[in-house]
Image (cartoon, coloured by chain):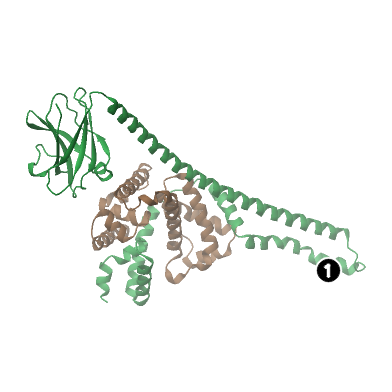
Chain colours: A brown, B green
Amino acid sequence: MPPAISYSEDELVYLLQQRNQEAFNYLYQNYSAVLFGVIARVISDQQIAQDVLQEVFVKIWTHIDSYDAGKGRVYTWMINIARNAAIDKLRSKGEIMKGKIHTGEDHVYNLQQSLKTEQHTDAIGLKKLIAELKPEYQRIIELSYFKGFTLDEISKMLEVPLGTVKTRMRHAIQLLREKFSR
Amino acid sequence: MDINEYISSGILEAYVLGALTEEERRDVEAKVTAHPELAVELEAIENAMQHFVEEHAIAPPAHLQNQIWEAIEAAQPAAASTSNTETPTEPKGADVYTIAHQSPRQLHPWRWLWAAAVIVLTGSLLFNFYLMNERNALREEQVAMRQEMDTMKQQHEALAATMQQYSHEKEMMADPSMKSVVMHTMQEGHPMVATVYWSPNKGEGYVSIQKLPAPPTGMQYQLWVMKDNKPVDMGMISNDVVAKSGMEKVQKPMTGTAQAFAITLEKAGGSPTPSMDKVYVMGKIPA
């Protein structure tokens, strides 16, 4: 369900700066599904995911002036706001588990959780692509992009050297690039 | 810096995937600003991830659109109020007109009406903002409480599971036929202790770890019983129990008479026969 982008990046920023309901409706109709898809992949609880989506729109609305066009596209900026807000929520939810963090058990739990998310999205037929990626690539995208772990943490979790984590990231995205350039 | 080497290292992908520390991020950003080739590559990576998330788009429930707009309005009182103050400015022209045709300082009844309307409108607006904020605060509280409930539920379940285990263990211990066999170290200079609680009639038993080193990766402890001077496999001991110095049920029950229990270090999943040089602890079963 790619958004029907009829506005250019500049127009989109301008539109956001108008801060009126029409601009919001446009933004919502074209981007809410993508943003919600990202959030739902991080947080499995539907209700919390919806709350986060609301937070994300409010954030986009109130922070559009701090968006720096020199640092990338506004679309990427919005996706990252959604991703970070969702991961923050996930972390605050897991706050109580802090003591357990970095134990093997915890990592297994995280891996299981990420696998669960994958099954969940599979079940509603929304992704075929990641299934085409090898499991080690899937896991790396899942752990970094959707669960917010750093290179160092992923390297420890998967028990592979840091350099290998980076090359796997490169290969995974290279496959995506090939697939989308088809 | 070798640009190609930098690109093929995967650092730009790690940047887009959000796996870098704050310091590493800043470093990448500086390099991208300095080298246009890196910016091109970075954009291609961002594009790929953008396509990727688009493939996973999920439409949120329809009612959210209005709810979110309300939340946005509540979050930006400044913008919302400017659009509303436009209404009261309308009568200005009318005021100028009426004042010119009225004796000074005397207010036309219409003007009173306008003033009243403006006051009522402003009051209602302020009240709405107040309600909206109140509502958002309540919603946040609700989310926090739901999360707290989730955590409590999890803790409760864990506690219930532990309780069940304890009561079962208590039952086992109260069994008069239960034998306890303390196994002592077989490796000189390495003090190790574990105990087997075993019911010869039922064959059931528990193995309790007091002191055993954590097995190396890919290895696991295996429990054996010497029966007619032959070792019989009684199953594996989970590494988790070893790490916690805990107790667990013996995997493979064994009834009848036996001479001794022993624990050996084997490859994960176990061996058909014990590695004799890897006998860690052993204890004789009293007749």
* Nearer-the-camera pick, A13 or B125: B125
State the image quarter where residue B40 is shown.
bottom left
Q: Which amino acid lies under the numbered mark 1 shown in the image of this protein?
A: Val
Element type at mark 1: helix
Note whether residue B56 is visible.
Answer: no
Quadrant position of the C terminus of chain B in the picture: top left
User: Percent x, y for residue A35?
Assistant: 45, 54
Residue at the spot 37% in from the left edge and 69% down from the top edge: B23
Quadrant position of the N terminus of chain B in the picture: bottom left
Picture mark count: 1
Chain for disc number 1: B
Q: Is residue B68 left or right of residue B195?
A: right
Q: Is residue A148 left or right of residue A12?
A: left
Q: Residue furthest right?
A: B103
Note whether residue B180 is visible.
Answer: yes
Which residue is disc 1 drawn over? Answer: B96
Residue at the spot 42% in from the left edge and 68% down from the top edge: A72
User: Percent x, y for residue A170?
Assistant: 27, 62
User: Percent x, y for residue A177?
Assistant: 30, 60
Q: Residue furthest top?
A: B201
- For disc 1, the neighbor class at 10 Å (few under 14, some 14 to 19, many from 20) is few
Q: Is residue B239 above or below residue A70?
A: above
Q: Is residue A81 left or right of residue B84?
A: left
Residue at the spot 73% in from the left edge and 55% down from the top edge: B123
